[in-house]
Image (cartoon, rainbow, N blue to C red):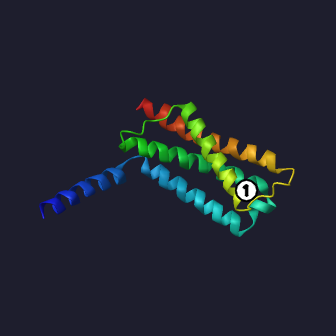
C-alpha cells in the first residue's frame, strides 16, 4: 500500500510539473492552430487551389517542433535548450523527414516542375517558424 501511495504521489508531482509548465500553453496553442488550419485547408482543397496557403502551416509546424523542444527542455534535465544552429538542424531534419513521408504516401506529384521549389520553400518556412520560437524563448525569455 505504501508503494502505491508513493507512486501516486510521484505521478501527481510529475503531472503537476508538466501541466503548470509555462511552455506547455504555447505548445498546445501552436498544435491546435496548426491542426485546425491543416484540416480546413484539406477539407476546402485550398492546398490545391491556392498553393501558397501552406506557408503559415509550415511556419506553425516549425513553431510546434521548436515549442516541443523547449517544453521538453524545461522539465527533463537531459534535454538542453538548443542553440539557434541546433534548432536549425533539428528543423531541417524534421522537414526532410516530412517531405520524404509525403513522397512515400503519394501526397505530392514529383513530376511537377513546381515540386523542387515547393520542397525548398516548405523547409525554409519550417525553419522560419522554428527560429521565431527559438528567438522568443531565448532572447525575449532571457530578459525577465
Left or right: 62, with 22 as reference point: right
The image quadrant where one finds the C terminus is: top left
Q: Residue 129, how many percent across, how many down?
A: 61, 43
- From this viewpoint, which residue is outermost toward the front? 104
The image quadrant where one finds the N terminus is: bottom left
Task: Name the quadrant containing residue 40.
Answer: bottom right
Up the image or down, 1 lies above or below 138; here it is: below
- Residue 129 in sight from this viewpoint: no
Q: Residue at x 59, y 56 (%)?
A: 34
- From this viewpoint, which residue is outermost toward the bottom? 43
Q: How many marks?
A: 1
Q: Residue at x 48, y 44 (%)?
A: 69
- From this viewpoint, which residue is outermost toward the left? 2
Q: Local crowd at mark 1 within 10 Å, few (<14), some, or many (≥20)?
A: few
Q: Residue 137, how many percent across, how many down?
A: 48, 37
Q: Residue 84, how many percent across, how many down?
A: 55, 32
Up the image or down, 134 lies above or below 31; here it is: above
Task: Determine whether the residue tagged by mark 1 lies in a helix, strand or loop.
Answer: helix
Q: Residue at x 54, y 47 (%)?
A: 65
Q: Which residue is mark 1?
A: 103
Q: Residue at x 17, y 57 (%)?
A: 6
- Residue 114 in sight from this viewpoint: yes
Up the image or down, 119 lies above or below 36; here it is: above
Left or right: 103, with 111 as reference point: left
Q: Residue 46, how many percent across, how many down?
A: 75, 62
Amino acid at each position: 500500500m505504501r508503494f502505491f501511495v508513493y507512486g501516486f504521489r510521484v505521478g501527481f508531482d510529475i503531472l503537476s510539473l508538466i501541466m503548470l509548465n509555462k511552455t506547455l500553453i504555447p505548445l498546445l496553442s501552436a498544435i491546435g492552430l496548426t491542426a485546425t488550419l491543416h484540416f480546413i485547408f484539406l477539407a476546402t482543397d485550398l492546398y490545391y487551389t491556392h498553393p501558397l496557403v501552406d506557408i503559415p502551416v509550415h511556419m506553425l509546424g516549425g513553431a510546434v517542433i521548436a515549442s516541443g523542444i523547449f517544453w521538453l527542455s524545461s522539465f527533463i534535465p537531459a534535454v538542453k535548450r538548443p542553440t539557434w544552429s541546433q534548432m536549425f538542424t533539428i528543423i531541417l531534419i524534421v522537414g526532410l523527414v516530412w517531405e520524404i513521408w509525403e513522397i512515400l504516401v503519394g501526397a505530392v506529384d514529383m513530376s511537377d516542375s513546381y515540386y523542387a521549389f515547393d520542397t525548398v520553400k516548405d523547409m525554409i518556412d519550417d525553419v522560419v517558424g522554428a527560429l521565431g520560437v527559438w528567438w522568443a524563448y531565448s532572447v525575449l525569455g532571457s530578459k525577465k
